[in-house]
Image (tube, helix red, strand yellow):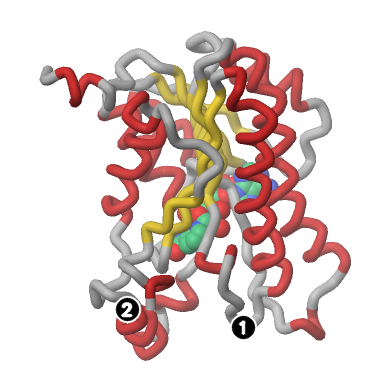
Amino acid sequence: MNTSLTRFDITGRVAVVTGASSGIGKHLSKALANAGAKVVVVARRAESIAELADSIGGHAVAQDLCSLQDFDAFAQTLSAPFGAPSILINAAGVNHRQPADDITVETWNETLHLNLSVPFFLSRALVPGMNGDGSIINIASLQSVRAFPNSMPYGASKGGVAQLTRAMAEAWSSSGIRANAIAPGFFPTELTQAVFDNPEKAAANAAQTCIGRNGELEDLVGPTLFLSSAASAYMTGQVLYVDGGFTAK
Ligand SMILES: NC(=O)c1ccc[n+]([C@@H]2O[C@H](COP(=O)([O-])OP(=O)(O)OC[C@H]3O[C@@H](n4cnc5c(N)ncnc54)[C@H](OP(=O)(O)O)[C@@H]3O)[C@@H](O)[C@H]2O)c1
């Protein structure tokens, strides 16, 4: 392999992907495995992640991340099959799409907890095992910088994810652990089904991009491999918008 390309190599690295039972987490789990990583996949739907793990030679850990109390013990569980992970993709997320008047303390807390608190506590628990060479990738959003209807807690959590990413870099990058975020535009998954089921809304979102279309899951693979690998060795604390230029307009 050409020496510049070897910097993209993640063969043999151990990765953890949360939110791996569907959408972005599932697609990125397959991409990391295709690139040679050993992938531990996490979500609540045990059957779905077991099937995925089988198909990619990975390992499945079924867990409700909202009810998790002991993140250090969970880090041990995640490290058991292949050794300590050096790549973490925090992709589990929820958006209840409630108008402000319908938001309850429960839905607010669940959204903030899963989307913002869990990435912090899980990352902190895995950082010591990364042993000075790790990459954390948080999944931010257009809503890290833009407001959309019926998404107040989601937007608050994703604004937080962008800042959390910088704070992680400040805390851990001098020890060799990089933290970056990918902010996807509109990608068809369970989370965005309501948007894609409405052709007018989907077309309006596509028209808002510079490129003129919504995202396809494969569009996230290159940026993920880049941020996972030594190709991005001097990059930390950044939010990479993979949004077809939505935020450029
Ligand atoms: N799709 C987009 O256009 C888009 C745009 C910007 C940002 N994002 C972000 O990308 C990430 C992935 O979203 P997606 O679009 O791929 O949505 P998705 O298909 O709905 O996936 C969400 C994942 O989170 C997991 N999850 C939900 N609650 C959980 C819990 N309590 N414990 C453990 N896992 C839980 C789900 O698995 P189980 O139900 O099996 O637990 C599922 O695997 C999210 O952070 C989302 O905010 C998506």
Residue at disc 2, secondary structure: helix
Residue at disc 1, CB closer than 8 Å to ligand 1: no
- Residue 3 visible in this rendered orientation of the protein: yes
Residue, disc 2: 206
In the shown orientation, is residue 135 left or right of residue 119?
left
| Residue 91, horizontal then vertical, whole percent | 53, 46
| Residue 76, horizontal then vertical, whole percent | 67, 14
Q: Earlier in the sequence, mark 2 or mark 1?
A: 1
Q: Which quadrant: the N terminus? A: top left
Residue found at x 50% / y 28%: 135
Residue at disc 1, secondary structure: loop
Residue found at x 72% / y 59%: 111
- Residue 64 visible in this rendered orientation of the protein: no
Q: Nearer the viewer, residue 229 or 63?
A: 229
In the shown orientation, is residue 150 left or right of residue 100?
left
Mark 2 burial class by Cα count in 10 Å: few <14, some 14-19, many 20+: many
Q: Are marks 2 and 1 in contact (CB under 8 Å)?
A: no
Residue found at x 66% / y 69%: 96
Q: Is residue 139 above or below residue 5?
A: below
Work out which residue is located at the far bottom of the displayed protein and give it: 200
Residue, disc 1: 149
Residue found at x 38% / y 79%: 249
